[in-house]
Amino acid sequence: MAYKLAVSDTVSVPVKFSQADGGKLKQFSFTLFIERQGETEFEEGCKGEHGVPTNAKVCEKMLSLTTGWKGQEFILNDDGTPAEFCQDALAVMYNAVGVLDVVVKSYIKENGARTKNS
């Protein structure tokens, strides 16, 4: 018998961060849609050749799991309009310093179980 989780296969991941822009901090807030994976599968997919997670493998894993976005204004087209979701635009986002870390932390938080406060 096969089993599956009683939740969606896709996680809506809120992403919030700021980036320096001409001496000021510019705030960004949007949602990424990322395929749900179990803890072991996710961790194994992030490991490099020596069995230790590497930034390159984490980026590769997140690129393969991310399926879309909503409200994104961080990655722009040449004309200044927000880019449509595609792997090339996503790679630019994930290669911006610190953004991948923010996304992974939020993904792990949203993908995991939570205790209910009484």
Image (cartoon, rainbow, N blue to C red):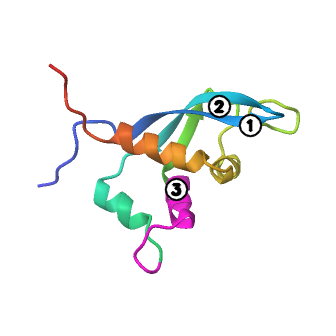
Mark 1 residue type: Ala
SS for callout 2? loop
What residue is drawn where x is 66% and y is 27%?
A: 27
Tell whether 116 sits left or right of 9.
left
SS for callout 3? helix
Residue 109 position (above or below residue 97): above
Residue 83 can be seen, yes or no: no
Quadrant location, the C terminus = top left
Assess disc 1: are there few (<14), some (14-19) or many (≥20) residues with their C-alpha within 10 Å of its C-alpha: few
Assess disc 3: are there few (<14), some (14-19) or many (≥20) residues with their C-alpha within 10 Å of its C-alpha: few
Coordinates of residue 24 in the picture (x, y in percent): 77, 29
User: For residue 40, which numbered disc appears in the image?
Assistant: none
Tell whether 5 sits left or right of 55.
left
Residue 43 can be seen, yes or no: yes
Q: Which residue is mark 2?
A: 72
Q: Which residue is mark 3?
A: 64
